[in-house]
Image (cartoon, rainbow, N blue to C red):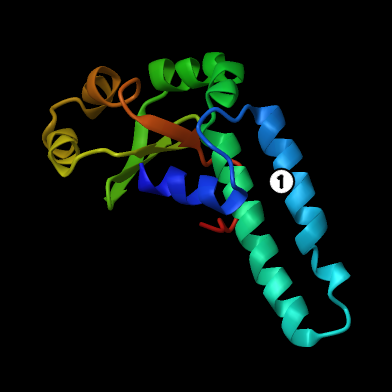
Amino acid sequence: MKRIERHRAILGVDEKATLSDLKKVYRKIMMEWHPDKFQDSDEAKKMAEEKSAKLIASYHFLVSVHIETHEATKDAYIATTTDASIDDFEFKSEILRVVFSDGNEYEYYGVPKAIYVKLVNADTPDRFARRHIYENYLYRSTSKIVGGNE
């Protein structure tokens, strides 16, 4: 998926990177690009602020879609997708955002428009999503993201 590859490129990691690897790489790069290190030049400081914002966004995105994160939050995810109903959903550029009745929100990546159309037209969207979306597409929780930096 292009989005994941873009974020991996920003941090300079590959698909084999563990959460620990991501954290080490992120900390090392942030030490280089922290805006406080660029006090002599406003232009350099601004560039460092922009670079660090990209690094932060990439790190948080990669952590949120990492398999280790999914494993650690699997029980909560299953509880939401099994017990809560869909309150709202929206689709844009193969990203399906679902808001659940328990207050959780998830984004699903790589969802074809045809699947979205079937979800919209399903007699029971909850059942359709359980069968065709929740376990079939890369996802991440967006419940705790405020003001997102994507």
Q: Amino acid at mark 1?
A: Tyr
- Residue 97 falls in which quadrant of the image? top left
Q: Position of residue 112 (x, y in %)?
A: 20, 40
Q: Position of residue 71 (x, y in %)?
A: 56, 17
Is 21 on the left-hand or right-hand side of 96? right
Q: Quadrant of the N terminus?
A: top left
- Residue 83 falls in which quadrant of the image? top left
Is 18 on the left-hand or right-hand side of 86? right
Which residue is found at the position 48% from the left and 16% from the top?
Answer: 79
Query: Is residue 145 at all visible to an observer of this figure?
Result: no
Which residue is found at the position 88% from the left and 83% from the top?
Answer: 40
Along the viewing direction, whichever of 22 and 96 lies nearer the viewer? 22
Q: Position of residue 28 (x, y in %)?
A: 78, 48
Residue 6 position (above or below residue 39):
above
Which residue is found at the position 42% from the left and 23% from the top?
Answer: 84
Residue with the mark numbered 1: 26
| Number of marks present in the image shown | 1
Is 74 on the left-hand or right-hand side of 130? right
Query: Is residue 82 at all visible to an observer of this figure?
Result: yes
**Which SS class for mark 1?**
helix
Q: Position of residue 135 (x, y in %)?
A: 34, 20
Along the viewing direction, whichever of 98 and 101 lies nearer the viewer? 98
Residue 27 position (above or below residue 32):
above
Residue 49 position (above or below residue 19):
below
- Residue 110 falls in which quadrant of the image? top left
